[in-house]
Image (cartoon, helix red, strand yellow):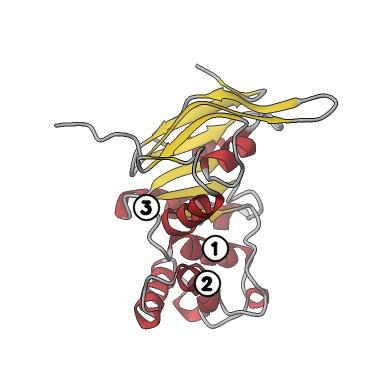
Amino acid sequence: MVKQPPLLRTEKLTRTLTGEIPITLVKQADVAIHAGEFVAIVGPSGSGKSSLLYLLGLLDKPTSGDLFFDGMNMSTATEHERARTRLAKMGFVFQFHFLLPEFSALENVLLPMQQLGEVPFEQGKARAIELLTRLGLKEQMHKRPHQLSGGQSQRVAIARALINKPQMLLADEPTGNLDSTSGNTVKQMFRELARTENCALAIVTHDDSFSAQADRTIHIVDGVIQP
């Protein structure tokens, strides 16, 4: 059986903040992540975990090095190409859900699909309802964020991240603001998603029990990935 090439691959990826005293957040990172693989990014506070995730998710541009995603060198891509790739092929979940308060859960989930503009509305709506139902939110889909618990809001954010059927889901401390029960539910959902959606997962976490569920762990200290 021929092994498929990585979905995402980096070569000496580096991000340095310029200034009177330059600060290197990530230094010459070599990373490879395959479709359907769950990778946890761990390390001490301030070690560069989130900085690495933001580079992998095309939210920040590297100072040097290359990042290849789905066969394309995103380090030399235009801002439009990077933005389009983020919207069409990546999903993001953060510690805080960032749901828009004036919209219902269903409407929040639909926003990225409407922005991409490639799927008829009714087809996208059906997918949104299916995702919310799978995530245990069938009865909450018409509620606004202030009517939802923290765990419910985070599950809405997960559904929103999945609406465009991304090839990769990136999450930054997605259980960090949840109680233990809600956090455990979200952890189970991420692992299931990697299996059912064949979606690569890259998740920053301080939670040892969460990182233990990953297929592989990337340990970073002072911006350097440890061997």
Question: In the image, what residue type sits under mark 1?
Answer: Ala
Closer to the chain start, of discs 2 and 3, is 2
| Front residue of 84 and 148 | 84
**Decide: marks 1, 3 in contact (CB < 8 A)?**
no
Q: What residue is at 51 percent from the left and 47 percent from the top?
A: 170
Relative image position of residue 218 (x, y in whole percent): 50, 28
* Separation of residues labelled 2 and 1 (CA atoms): 11 Å
Closer to the chain start, of discs 1 and 3, is 1
* Separation of residues labelled 1 and 3 (CA atoms): 16 Å
Q: Is residue 119 above or below residue 6?
A: below
In the displayed structure image, the side of residue 98 where residue 77 appears, left or right: left
Q: Is residue 221 above or below residue 168?
A: above
Residue 1 position by quadrant: top left
In the displayed structure image, the side of residue 217 where residue 19 appears, left or right: right
Within 10 Å of disc 3 (Cα), the crowding (few <14, some 14-19, many 20+) is: few
Q: Which mark is residue 111?
A: 2
Question: In the image, what residue type sits under mark 3?
Answer: Glu
Within 10 Å of disc 2 (Cα), the crowding (few <14, some 14-19, many 20+) is: some
Determine if residue 74 is in view.
yes
Q: Secondary structure at mark 1?
A: helix
Question: In the image, what residue type sits under mark 2?
Answer: Leu
Relative image position of residue 16 (x, y in whole percent): 69, 29
- Residue under circle 3? 192
Q: What residue is at 56 percent from the left and 22 percent from the top?
A: 28
Mark 2 vs mark 3: give the one in front: 2
* Separation of residues labelled 2 and 3 (CA atoms): 24 Å
In the displayed structure image, the side of residue 69 where residue 174 appears, left or right: right
- Residue under circle 1? 157
